Image (cartoon, rainbow, N blue to C red):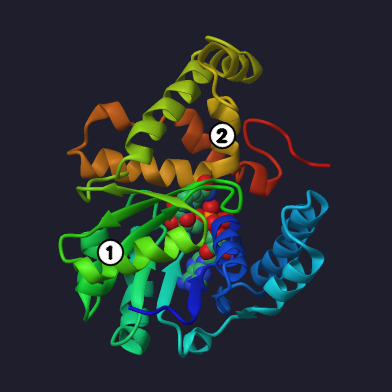
Amino acid sequence: MDIRRIGVVGAGQMGNGIAHVAALAGWPVQVQDVSASALEKARSTIEGNLARQVKKATITAEVAAATVERIGFSTELAAFDGCDLIIEAATENVTLKHKIFEGLSRSFGEHAILATNTSSISITAIAAKTARPDRVIGMHFMNPVPLMALVEIIRGLQTSDETWATVDAAAKKMGKTTVLASKDMPGFIVNRVLMPYINEAVWALYEGIGTAEAIDTGMKLGTNVPMGPLTLADFIGLDTCLAILEVLRDGMGGDSKYRPCPLLTKYVEAGWLGKKAGRGFYNYQG
Ligand code: NAD
């Protein structure tokens, strides 16, 4: 299937990055969010990130300007008219995603492939909310999208071979390497492995085994990862980490292995959601 125009639902950390790489690959892109301020922030983030690429000489100023030109921003779903691929990157919440896909299916489902950037939620159940479940797929980008090489692709039970091939080719055109999660299980591959690790780091902090700095430095230098687990959690968003752990716990029959640390829940209750909120395990203000 030929993709001529791409829509992105949600203009947060992930939505702006997906719009960036899709427009840089040459597609006209329409971004939609319920929040006008999120759209405004997304526009300036994309412009800032493209300017950084120009400074590093990975793209020219002309390419950056043309990329910005290709992206439209709207609070209206109607802006997706003519999109062949719509990638949903709204908040990690099952009820919300089901509602969004019901709406997308009603208006665009006959023609467009509907992909979700969910970190953990069942693709099969999301697809079942639509009239064309064969055209629904998981397209899991990593954060920050312009820098991270991977897109994890997840087939729901109903996803067709054509949908998979089209989305796989689109991700590759965006310069990404793809891996396929062969089974639509909670957290797929990446978050099934990552989230228990992050949660264990929060438990270590909660139990006073080390400070946040000690835990992060220990894991960074001790296991040769680019950043420690608590910094990574702050970058992902603590609300997103908590939501993923809850999906893992509930989807794996209540297995206590996935029980979110109470400290993580407390931080989310406090609104300390990580870098995007200015405070998480670390302070980002200023
Ligand atoms: P975020 O909090 O930065 O942004 C979410 C955006 O969704 C907000 O701008 C919000 O206004 C918008 N939104 C909420 N309801 C909406 C609706 N009904 N219609 C349109 N927009 C709506 O979150 P994020 O980090 O960008 O995560 C988005 C999705 O990407 C989640 O499913 C998350 O699990 C997934 N994801 C996140 C990461 C990460 O590292 N943060 C990595 C991979 C995947």
Residue 164: mark in rendering: 1
Which circle's residue, 1 or 2, is located before the other in the chain?
A: 1
- Residue 220's spot in the image, x, y percent? 58, 19
Distance in Å between CA atoms under marks 1 and 2: 29 Å
Q: Is residue 276 above or below residue 69?
A: above
Give the residue type at disc 1.
Answer: Trp
Q: Where is the C terminus found, in terms of image quarters?
A: top right
Left or right of 279 in this view: 180: left
Name the residue located 48 percent from the left edge and 16 percent from the top edge.
204
Q: Nearer the viewer, residue 26 or 221?
A: 26
Q: Nearer the viewer, residue 47 or 196?
A: 47
Q: Quadrant of residue 161?
A: bottom left
Residue under numbered circle 2: 232
Q: Nearer the viewer, mark 1 or mark 2?
A: 1
- The structure residue drawn at horizontal position 78% and vertical position 48%, both measured from the top left corner, is 56
- Say whether residue 64 is left or right of residue 2: right
Q: Position of residue 73 (x, y in %)?
A: 63, 79
- Counting from the top left corner in percent of width and height, residue 15 is at 55, 63
Residue 22 percent coordinates (x, y): 55, 67
**Residue 129 visible in this rendered orientation of the protein:** no
- Res. 14 in view: yes
Q: What residue sits 59% from the left and 38% below the top?
A: 234
> Could you tell whether 281 is left or right of 88 in the image?
right
**Which quarter of the rendering shows the N terminus?**
bottom left
SS at mark 1?
helix
Tell me the kind of residue under disc 2. Answer: Leu
The residue sitting at 77% across, 59% down in the picture is 48
Vertical placement of residue 100 versus 77, above or below? above
Q: Nearer the viewer, residue 281 or 69?
A: 69
- Which quadrant of the view contains residue 258? top left
